Image (spheres, coloured by chain):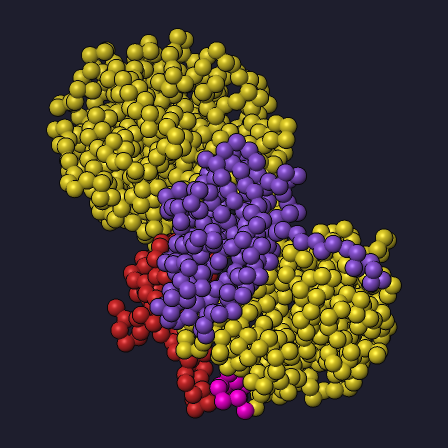
Amino acid sequence: MSSLVENNVVEFRTTFQPVLDQDGFLINQDDLVCREITDLSLMVIRTSKDHKKNAITIKDIFNAKLPESLSASLNDNGDNFLWISPDEIWLLHNRNNKDQLLEKLKSLPKGMSTIDSSGAYGILEFSGNNVDALLSRWMSYDLEGSLTIGKVVSTTCGQAPVCVYRNIQGNLLMMVRHSFSHYVAGLLKDSAKRI
Amino acid sequence: MRLKNHKSDFIDQSEALSFIFNNKSYKGYKGDTLASALIANDVLFFARSFKYGRKRGLMGSGVEEPNALVSLEIGGRYTPNLKATEVMLYDGLSAVSSSNPNSIDFRALIKPLHRFMPAGFYYKTFIKQKVWAMVEDSLRSIAGFSKAPTEKDEDVYDHIFHHTEVLVVGGGVAGITAALEVLNNSKTTRVILVDERAHLGGELFNEFQSDDTAISWHHDNLSKLLEFKNVANSRLKIFSRSTAYAWYDHNYIEVLQTNATGESLISGVTQAARKVLHKIRAKEVILATGAHERPMLFETNDLANIMLSQSVRRYLNEFGVISGKDVVLYGNNDSIYSTAIDIKNNAINCKVIDIRPSGGESETVLKAKKLGIEVLQGYAVLKAHGTNLVKGIEISSVELQGKKWRLTGPSKRLNCDLLASSGGFNPVVHLDCHCGAKTFFDEDSQAFLPQKVRKNRQVCGSISAIGFWKDVVIDAKNKAQLILLSLGEIKKSTQDSMSKNYLDYYNASQFFVPIEILNRPKVFIDMQNDVTTLDVALAIREGYRSIEHIKRYTAMGFGTDQGKTGNINGIAVAAQFLDVPLSEVGTTTFRPAYTGVDFGAMAGREVGGFFDPQRYTTIHDSHLESGAEFEVVGQWYRPWYYPKSGEDIHQAVNRECLAVRTSLGMMDASTLGKIDVQGKDSREFLSRVYTNAWMKLAPGSCRYGLMCNEKGMIIDDGVSTCINDNHFIMTTTTGGAASVYSALEMWLQTEWSDLDVHLSSVTDQFATVAVVGPNARNLMKVLCHDIDFERDNFKFMQWRPGTVCGVQARVMRISFSGELAYEINIEANYGRYIWDEVALAGKPWNITPYGTESMHVLRAEKGYIIVGQDTDGSMTPMDVNMKWILAKDKPFSYIGRRSFSISALNSDDRFQLVGLLTKDAHVVLPEGSHIINNKGGSIGYVTSSYFSPILRRSIAMAQLKGGLSKMTEIVLVKIVQEKQGLKEIPCEVSRSVFYDIEGEKVDGNE
Amino acid sequence: MFLIVCPYCKESRDQNEFSPAGEAFIARPQNPEELSDDEWSDYVFYRTNHKGDHWEQWVHTNGCRKYFLVKRSTISHEILEVAAFGEVTSENPS
């Protein structure tokens, strides 16, 4: 019995795996490409009531600026720090560095806490001229007018809560809770047929 | 008839289209509407009216049309109650009148009785419910219009959100001018222009015949618009065939765009959207919606071929069709002369009857006279003659004395086969009023105009009584300048002066509503609902004097046209009968939708699988492969049971439950809400929101918690785990996760912001595989080698970290079945892998996946409540016999505690949770069945009920008044038994734990 | 569907991102056990249901998830003022 278990290779499935096509795309058409980002992972950092302490901590531990309302900051490692609320930051980091990161996080001072949420979210990346046209079928946020580069917005896509971020390359990243992944993927694939 | 040699930009005579109307085939052209094509084919009767069943013809050319209702297509593309004026013709179109004018109509047969059926007839005759019930079905079958669809709508409808700085509603001269003015004077301002017709230009096309500058203006400005539109990342969007039908708070406007009328849009695997609902949020709105013409009132004014003058003009100019050869134009303003001129220039005979006296005429009137058109000034039409179709009119001289019209002469007859009237124009103010803006009656223009000032909105063109197109250009430019100022695009606005006589064009004389006309029979105000002037008089006599009451008593304005041609006339008539000015009568309230919106369009793509998010665990595909049937819990799809081939639910559940109790089962428990609690005040926080104690729960241990609201009622429960002094993980019920999390945040943020605690949802972070049954420990030892599973080293309600099948996990000993059980919590991405490994490794013990149904049975056997099933928001912990869970000496008055001591919550007569054992062990009580007293009244109801495989008898839990003091008593439960009808089932009141009462099974065998 | 400016995100958002959360300035009594049944029920059940300008709580459910205060006209839906929690109290409402 135990040999059955020991001989099997641990299988890690990404959030959107069940709905991607054989090339790994959710949508792949002219001026509209959507794929899953699988090498990033999400860590939630809750900050203290002391704004100064928060800024110093993030600088010391990560060498990054504490992001302001609705914005993101980066450090040299390519880690992204996304402002979600007055006391919540999301850290998007390379999945392979997770252990290193957890070590760093051990030195968070009292009043701050972290929650590994890499299993909770899937990340989609959208690129092409028709991205805003597609998402405006389901999102009431003014993406075209207000989602500038470096901006982070938590809002809705249809009835699902999502977080969208326009990165330096101008591509749009969407973080979706995995239990809403089929729903969101379904909505977007359907709308893309008519774009 | 179709004019020969007619040149139109829109009718493509090279492309003939075939269509069927009322079972006859006809031909038309691309660019026709169904209405224009039927006029071309000399079809004069379109429908029957609602109440009296009178044969009716076309009256208008657009959305104001009250008569020509048709049903389009059949099956999945069938659409009821469309106006023939709105249906763009396509090849193969098939339509029928909503109520066939050519068939015998029962309502028409009872014509002699019509005078006994005035307004209020139905109300007064059928006010007794019994009488109405008798005739309702037959009345409904002969009244009304199209039948409701019976097949699924096969079309696709999209929704799109838009944000814009400026929204221009209306694509006529005013709208085009305003849009261009804004674009020309800004760099990044976004503009959306919406227009309900197929081509931008509005009423300007009517001027093409007589004014070349209109043609060049149209050509130039359209080109300029397209220049803005056809660049990459354009800041101009133009939506044609798009109606703005609703204006909601904060400048949120909904627009319905029609892409195709009724053609099939399915081609191979693709299907285009039939309609698109645009949801537009605008900073500034410019209303350039124009005005609707209103007809003149006279006796028998509903005969076929009595139309609106500008509509006749539009059919002539845009479509090249006209429905008569001997035309009379009748009205009170200059526009009838413009129509007459256009008709005369097409060599068709026409006369003008103008109620205004001669003298001081405008250019237009003089031009008409010069062309040789016969003009009778100072005359009014009293009555139209003909049977179903107009053949002639009776006229008389009239005079305006002060503000009232008087008939002054004898009447005489004239022949005609088409009568086109204009009583003036009603600004299309509807959208402006949706959010509560008011209108005011302007004496000069005899119109209700939009309120003068409104934040972030301007009106221009004929909506504000400016009629001549060159004046409209100036007005639109001026208003656009004000918008630019409001946006901060310019520092000072340029306001050009209007021409000297700019108000003349629109200028209609006083409403022609002398009592001598109003007291005649069959002077119709509302064509669709057969409302006459006498109905309005009746309403007023009976005490319904406010316009809102008059509307409802007479049904004026109720139809699909919403009174666009009738209501303002109705207000004038009411004013006359009440002897007050129109401004005092006012308008009825304008509400969305301005024109009809398909239900399908409102739903958009949120239909079928997209209606509500379908949430799955990461193990979902394995459940599908195992053939699970699913149950929807909140938004989650949870395996309900796993039928093997040939099994029904009872057989599956039996097998699953027995497997769990005798050997080994497995369940996906990932959907439960999980909340991560961190901070130095974690224990204090838990103590305040749960009824029980948390201060001493050691790291590595778990505890069941009960949560109440401030009213003392149970709202949730779950097991919380102590990771360390500053870190806990709470669980909630699947359905309660979001609301509990929200309530906890509310307490933390609004009442206890001094507490150092963070709450984060981790529901999606972890997948949970439960391994349940006497052989659970054996299996865990195979799956995990770095945890000591010996009974005394890993006790019930404890947890251990470890590696399960190579994956980091938290293993918890919790049990919802009373059996030995371990819950394996792993990062969600490994959920499916762990499930499959557990299924494989558990084969030697015949491991059986089980779903929510079995889970419910197992916990009911042990008397564990399910919040939301055994409780309903009205049960306290005492009511469910859980007084033991209320900590006695917590210093903080936790949520709900104070309410427990309220007298009402301590009465012995409260609904209390008990068990029920049917005397006949095979009878399973339906959940929801009532427990009755000896008078047949309800004294409780069954909350949970199952057949227990292990006990081989039915068990149930119920809320029963004073139940806890009724142990062993026999009560009756009223049920409906299949094939036997109502039965009263005797049951013994018992405690709600039925199996393993001593709790011995939870530690397993070893 | 109206717009609300979230005082934390500092941006105007659609109503569908928010959830209403009851009348504002209702503080949980510090010592519930010292209140009579009537006084306690007043806190639990009674609200003013004011016609006109109404101070109420909203939460940015699908955004930053924070609670804040809104002064809204219950007649016209106009949002007159928005404040972070604690910035305005019943002593200094505007």
The quadrant where residue B851 appears: bottom right
- The answer to whether one can see residue B568 in this image is no
Q: Main secondary structure of the magenta part?
A: loop
Label the red chain with its letter: C
Residue at the location (57% across, 39% down)?
A27
Residue at the location (33% across, 11% down)?
B346
Up/down of B21 relative to B451, above or below: above
- The answer to whether one can see residue B662 in this image is yes
Could you say where residue B818 lies in the image, as x and y percent from the top left? 76, 76
Magenta highlight on residue B294: no
Magenta highlight on residue B899: yes
Colour chain B is painted in:
yellow
Q: Is residue B66 left or right of residue B272?
A: left
Could you say where residue B821 lies in the image, as x and y percent from the top left? 75, 72
- Of residues B476 and B689, the one drawn nearer to the viewer in this rendering: B689
Could you say where residue B309 lies in the image, as x and y percent from the top left? 32, 25
- From the image, which quarter does the C terminus of chain B lie in? bottom right
The quadrant where residue B291 appears: top left
Could you say where residue B425 lies in the image, as x and y percent from the top left? 28, 33
Residue at the location (38% across, 76% down)?
C26
Q: Is residue B107 left or right of residue C27?
A: right
- From the image, which quarter does the N terminus of chain B lie in? top left
- Of residues A184 and B265, the one drawn nearer to the viewer in this rendering: A184
* Total labels drawn: 0
Colour chain A is painted in:
purple
- Of residues B416 and B966, the one drawn nearer to the viewer in this rendering: B966
Part of the protein shown in magenta: B889-901
Residue at the location (16% across, 39% down)?
B493
- Of residues C70 and B289, the one drawn nearer to the viewer in this rendering: C70
Q: Is residue B94 left or right of residue B544?
A: right
